[in-house]
């Protein structure tokens, strides 16, 4: 659980940093108002979580550079469970 949280927040920080630099990485059905940076950060972590867990609610859509980052994040989201299961299986096999 901690590993997923670290990955989700890490990608959220990447998205938020790009947004703060003026690079659009996702857009919403309803336009955003320019709020405080913390709102961008929370929205970016939400977008990261939806992408990492491949839920895809459809309220935020990746655009531009965000599409490529979202693809990488989704691949990480698919790979993590397989890696964790393989690690547990190998550890269990060693104990026999």
Image (cartoon, rainbow, N blue to C red):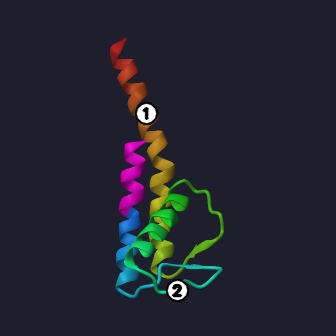
In the image, taking residue 68 as reference, residue 90 lies left or right, namely left
Count of number-bearing discs = 2
Name the spot of residue 68 as percent of width and height, x first: 47, 72
In the image, taking residue 48 as reference, residue 14 lies left or right, namely left
Return the residue nearer the eye: 65 or 41: 41
Vertical arrangement, residue 60 with respect to residue 50, above or below = below
Q: Disc 1 marks which residue?
A: 86
Residue at image point 46% right, 69% down: 44
Q: Which residues are magenta?
A: 1-10
Vertical arrangement, residue 63 with respect to residue 70, above or below = below
Residue at image point 52% right, 86% down: 33
Label 2 SS: loop
Name the spot of residue 62 as percent of width and height, x first: 54, 75
Vertical arrangement, residue 33 with respect to residue 73, above or below = below
Quarter where residue 18 is shown: bottom left
Q: Disc 2 marks which residue?
A: 33
Label 1 SS: helix
Residue at image point 44% right, 54% down: 76
């Amino acid at each position: 659980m901690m590993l997923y949280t670290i990955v989700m927040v890490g990608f959220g920080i990447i998205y938020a940093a790009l947004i703060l630099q003026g690079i659009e990485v996702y857009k919403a059905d309803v336009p955003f108002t320019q709020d405080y940076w913390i709102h961008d950060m929370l929205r970016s972590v939400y977008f990261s979580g939806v992408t990492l867990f491949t839920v895809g609610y459809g309220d935020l859509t990746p655009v531009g550079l965000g599409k490529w980052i979202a693809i990488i994040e989704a691949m990480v989201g698919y790979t993590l469970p397989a890696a964790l299961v393989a690690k547990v299986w190998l550890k269990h096999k060693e104990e026999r």
